[in-house]
Structure formats: C-alpha cells, structure tokens
Image: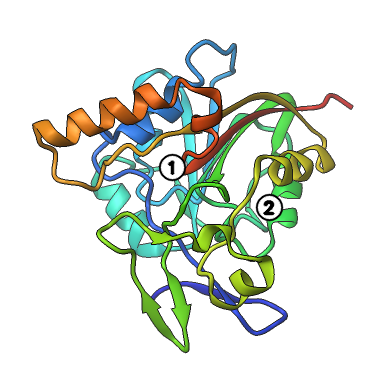
Amino acid sequence: MELRWKRENGSCIFGGAPVGHTGREIGLLLRLNLLRDLQIGKTVLSIGCGLAVELLLLRKRGYNTIGLDPEQSFLLKGKKGGNADDLIQAIGEQTPLRDGIFDLILLFEVLEHVMNPALVLNEVDRLLKPGGILFVTVPNRFYPFETHGIQVHQKQIHNFLGIGIPFFSMAPSFLRRRFERARIYTKAELAFLLRRHCFGLYIIEYTMPTLDNARQTHLTRAIRHVFFSLGRVPFVKELGPNIMMVSVKRKQ
C-alpha cells in the first residue's frame, strides 16, 4: 500500500520511490560526487533512504552509515542487498537516535514527501554535530515537467512518456496543492527553509536529466551528453529537474 499523509485541506502528500536501485544510477553518483572534495567526518545518516544504495556506496569509501525509512518493504529489500545492520524503520519527524552524533545527513528526494518538512529539519538539526553537513535534493519548480504525476479523485495520472506532466510544475500553488502528489521548491524557497533552521548554504547546484530510467542505448547516452553540456550554461541548468543544496549547521 502506498504511503500517504493528509494535509489540512484534505489533499495528500504521497511517499516517494528509492533514488537508487543498483548503485550505478548517474543521478545518484552525481550527488555523491558533489561531496568528494569536502572535509567530512565518518558518520552518515540517510533519512528516507529507500533501498539505501547510497549508503552502500559510502560504506565502500569508509563511512559509518545508518538509514531511516518509513517503508518496511524498501528496508527489507535493502537488507537483502547488503545493508544488514544499519537500517531502521522510522519517519524523519521523529527518529530513535541520540543528539549530535552525525557528521553528514542526506535528504535525497525526501522533503517533498514528508508530513512536515519543518519538523524533519528540526530533527536534522538535533542529530547533526556542530558544523555538520546537510545535503538536500528536491524537485525544481522551474523544471518544465512534473515528475511525480498528479492525483485526481483518487486516480493517479502517471507521467507522459516517462518524462513528466508538462508545465504542471509551474502551476499556481493553489492548483498544485489540489492535485500534486509531492511538494516542489524554488531555489529561494529551499534556501529560506534551510536558513530558518540554522543552516548556512555552502553549495547550490542543479541536476540535468540523467535518463536513469530509460533503456540504456547509444542514443540514450548521446542525449544525456547533450543535457550535461547544456547544464554548463548557467541559465539552462537552473531549469534542471532537481536542486541540490549542501548546507552547514551553524555552530552555537
């Protein structure tokens, strides 16, 4: 059964899907590469970890990892994939972990799905060490396609051609809240939310379409190369499907 959370207006926010299944997804590798040159301690928490593929990759780099997710089926599959002892079923708003024990917390495609983003960020603030790193990725409101589908009278309308629903991402907020399956953010909205919860911005980047879910052919790779080339153009990259922000917890 798909996870969903009711909002005050009666509409729903739905649970998400794992960001990685094999560990070879280009989008996942690009996220982790953004951390490559940072000086980070060794304890990592992924909230909304899904199958926790990102944690497997980080463990191979020497990190100590823990993953949280409310969906038991994801965690069971993740354990079969090699995450035996570090996956816990929990929601991001309330975690069974001690204060100030993590150097790095990941929120990969999570804030758009949770019941209360502010409570999740309060929890992140509690769990991070002073000067710890928060890495957030969210869908970009200025990407021309809504990638989560929409919900109309309990009926889900899926993405067209696996790309998304054209222009619904840019629809007015009152319309989005009626039909959306997940929240969506501008760079300014996400930056404001993080600063309000005592996080200073360090890196702001965007992903371009990685075509991870498409059949991998020579044509797919060529199109991906074109997208990545366009991503070097400042204005164009800000139309990418995801915003990535690396933030630092301000020392008290």
What residue is rendered at 48% in x and 65% in y? 15
What percent of the width, then of the height, locates residue 238? 55, 34
Mark on residue 120?
Answer: 2
Name, please, the residue furthest toward the left: 217
Residue 17, given in percent of the width and then of the height, sits at 38, 57
Is residue 37 shown above or below 130? above
The answer to which of 39 and 192 lies nearer the viewer is: 192
> Is disc 1 placed on a helix, strand or loop?
loop
Residue nearest the observer in this picture, 34 or 47: 34
Amino acid residing under circle 1: Asp
Tell me how far mark 2 sits from mark 1, CA to CA: 20 Å
- The local crowd at label 2, few if under 14, some if 14 to 19, many if 20 or more residues have their Cα within 10 Å, is many
For residue 45, which numbered disc appears in the image?
Answer: none
- The dot on residue 86 is 1
In the rendered image, the vertical position of residue 119 relative to residue 215, given as above or below:
below
Which quadrant of the view contains residue 162?
bottom left
Q: Is 97 on the left-hand or right-hand side of 14? A: right
Count of numbered circles in the view: 2
Does 171 sit left or right of 249 as displayed?
left
Residue ID at (27%, 41%): 211
Location of the N terminus by quadrant is bottom left
Tell me residue 248's x, y (percent).
Answer: 72, 26
Disc 2, SS = helix
Q: Quadrant of the C terminus?
A: top right
At label 2, the amino acid type is Val
Image quadrant where residue 54 sits: top left
